[in-house]
Amino acid sequence: MRFTPVVAGFAFALTATAAFAAYNNVVVKLKTPVAEASDSVIVLGAAWSCAGDTCTTVLDRKTAQVRDCRQVARALGPVASFTVGGSSLDEAGIQACNAAVK
């Protein structure tokens, strides 16, 4: 019986860590697919993995922000969607993001 609280605490810690980590996954769908897969694009201080029209990384973010999307769009091209965990930019946010692309 003594191990039950320890096991329960460990299980909670794993669950809490997994839930927190989900907010750090960043997924960008590009309007135009990349020419070839790459793991070497550095944007926002992180290495992005890109294949086809999808680029992913892990960042210390909880919500999708236009300012982050703009930096990604400048480096990778116009985006169709920008998602951080369960938070996505709306259409107005995507338009503001893509305004940074020259």
Image (cartoon, grey):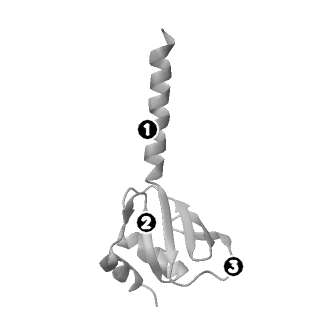
Q: Residue 80: x and y, percent?
A: 45, 79
The dot on residue 96 is: none
Alpha carbon distance from label 1 to label 3: 36 Å
At label 3, the amino acid type is Glu
Figure check: 25 above or below 101: above
Disc 3 designates what residue?
36
Q: Residue 92: x and y, percent?
A: 30, 79
Image point (35%, 83%), residue name: 95
At label 1, the amino acid type is Ala
In the image, farthest residue toward the top: 1
At label 2, the amino acid type is Thr
In the image, farthest residue toward the left: 92
Local crowd at mark 2 within 10 Å, few (<14), some, or many (≥20)?
many
Disc 2 designates what residue?
83
First in residue order: circle 1 vs circle 3: 1
Please state if 58 lies on the left or on the right of 23 as rendered: right
**Disc 3 on helix, strand or loop?**
loop
The dot on residue 16 is: 1
Figure check: 15 above or below 64: above
Residue 54 lies in what quarter of the image? bottom right
Please state if 16 lies on the left or on the right of 57 as rendered: left
Q: Do residues under tags 1 and 2 come within 8 Å of each other at their CB atoms?
A: no
